[in-house]
Amino acid sequence: MSRRHAVLVVALLAGCGSPSVPGNVTLDRWRSGDAEPGQWLGLGRTYRADRFSPLVALSDTNANRLGFAWESDARSRRGRVEHGQEATPIVVDGVLYVSGPWGTAIAVDAKTGRQIWRYDPEVDGSYGRRACCDVVSRGLSVWGGRVYVATLDGWLVALDAATGTEVWKVDTFEDRDTRFYTITGPPIVAKDVVVVGNSGAEFGVRGYITGYDRATGARKWRFYTVPGDPAKAPPENDAMKRALETWGPKTDWASGLGGTVWGEMNYDPELNLLYVGTGNSTPYAGWHRDPSGGDNLYLVSILAINPDDGQLRWHYQQVPWEIWDYTATMNMILADLTIDGRPRQVLMQAPKNGFFYVLDRATGELISAKPYVYVNWASGVDSTGRPILTGKANYRDRPAAVFPTQAGGHNWQPMAFNRQTGLVYIPAREQGMIMFTEREYRWLPGDVNMGSGAIFGDLPKDFKPSQELPMQVPPELARQFADAARAEPSMATREFLLAWDPIAQRERWRVPLGATEMMGGGVLTTAGNLVIQGTAAGQLVVYRADTGEKLHEIDVGTAIIGAPVSYEVDGVQYVAAVAGFGGALNPALAPGTAATRYANYGRILAFALGGGVAPLPPKRTPQPVPEPPPAEWYRETEAARGAGLFAQRCARCHGGRGEAQLSAYPDLHRLPAATHAIFDSIVLGGKLAPSGMASFADVLTPADSRAIQAYLIREQRVLFAESAATKP
């Protein structure tokens, strides 16, 4: 063989994804993913990101034979807290890759679960305080023999896919010392660049995405999603010039404005377009952010960007002058549909705001938008693509009942599209919230900066705003909460798996999942006429894709909130998912979740036909209430003030109180005497910062710390007395 022919053979092998090069995803493989039905090359399997597996060995005729195949350890290596597992695995040539909390990465044998390597970025634990909704990671990318993962503290890392060793590492953050940026979303490879966004809008940051050379890590471009202060610097490009025209002269530039990109992005290699969903504003309340009422581009928008130069090609804004935390960061699906007799290249999304959108992905033209859950903030979308506001959900002057909630009609848990049934399967939710505004607002470093508050679900009969809300509520405002709730149907949670027809824009079937928040995980669908979904209750559930009939349920004892995948190794079809409860609900575990019954830790679980019974974790042991310090350790006036401070500064993580309010974080209402003795050194001194409990000395005084401790001692004394009274 001549040298020229040898080089050609090597090139062809590389283009086909030679198994001799671990993680060798290429542009050709990305384009023709259906030619390799046994692979799962990206978070959505192929560039279409429809989470549709063409495999048919597992089908609606034998799904009841699906059982446990193997398990691999994915538990956290830091402290007492097990954080959420929200990532979708990627499977390339028999190796399963997945990210975990803090930006860890694991590679395991996809046939046996044997760990090949593990990467731990050793993130500074204090960054846990900067994350609004747990220290999660929602995925990684595999390409060209490398694994790309983003760490919570802002580093984009390229790892050797064979060994897990660092190839390069770059800092993606700006204003690191003054702004609470984090990364919880996955990076994506778009031809020659790897692109990553960030989180942190609730803390007051300016959103952006950045493209880096995937070979070297050199920065190629950066695209901001909202303008910067024009008094400090001119707009960076034409897109920012156009955006600036939609922000008023009294815009609160100090607040950063938000627009972060923390969800999945898509790359279409045929159109060479990168699709980006942008997030909510900072603050939520538009009258505090920009009283002009302008559109505030590019908040809550879908952007199409040329990955070669980072320039905007088109945009579609879902919620102009956004005030409800209605992000457009939910997963997007690319499909080719025939609509009104005409073939269309479309992009589909079911974002938080309750409308299902179908866009022309080449031009950004809105094809259709219809509500897939109950919505009261808008009655529809007009011919120009703008929502038709009802005015019912405006909370500027008085509390308002709003549907959907900030958790959305659909949140980050990925939906899927089955090309055979033509249906999209959405982990959906109907729920109302009462929103109200802070009368005064200014951006505070190191704090949440929303300018508003919200209470989810039906108000309890004994609701007391002074205890439930992290801000002072005037009595006349408090009386308006119940009035707002009565103005709408039940505010209670209703979760379901929804089958949606994207062409007819209507529901085909739904399966109720219960009345507990965040019960339904992400979705997988297959050519075997199946829809597979995990639940927070700890089951993997299999349904018929055409009718929604439940075919099989496997109890694993650990919440599955990310999306399952399906792949093939040596002729065997597997279904795999990462399990472990966490995320925004860590501070108060919802009743019915597996974490209230079993020990909660990260697991990678795989299933196959003929598999066995899944092993369950150890049963959860009730936590005793230690004897509290004596009454002379606190004063009632301090405890009363401390209750409000706790709600404002601590409840975001340590919301649980007693067995009835379980939390994945330590329950501060049940501290041992040794911890009470060093309370200030933890809260103000950062003694436990390496394990995730950062110092709060920047926002709390010694008197504040004493007040919080006084409140905790008072409550612990109540719990101790209650537990003593119930002992036999």
Image (spheres, rainbow, N blue to C red):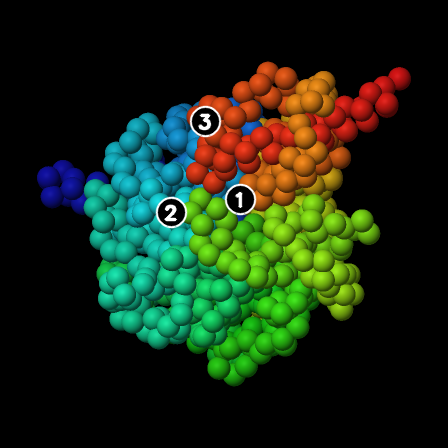
Amino acid, disc 2: Arg
| Placement of the N terminus among the 4 image quadrants | top left
- Label 3, secondary structure: give it: loop
- Residue drawn 30% across the image and 52% down it: 210
Using residue 300 as the reference point, say whether residue 150 is left or right of it. left
Q: Mark 2 near mark 1, Cβ–Cβ under 8 Å?
A: no
**Depicted 626 relative to depicted 136: above or below:** above
Q: Marks 2/1: CA distance?
A: 17 Å
Is residue 32 in sight in this rendering?
no
Q: Which residue is mark 1?
A: 133
Can you identify the residue that label 2 sits on?
Answer: 179
| Residue 633 x/y as whole percent | 66, 23
Residue 658 appearing in the image: yes
Front-most of residues 615 and 440: 440
In x, y percent, where is residue 80? Answer: 56, 24
Residue at label 3? 685
Looking at the image, residue 500 sits to the left or right of residue 146; the answer is right
- Observer-side mark, 1 or 3, equals 3
- Closer to viewer: mark 3 or mark 2: 3
Q: Residue drawn 58% across and 44% down? A: 648
Quadrant for residue 717, please give it. Answer: top right
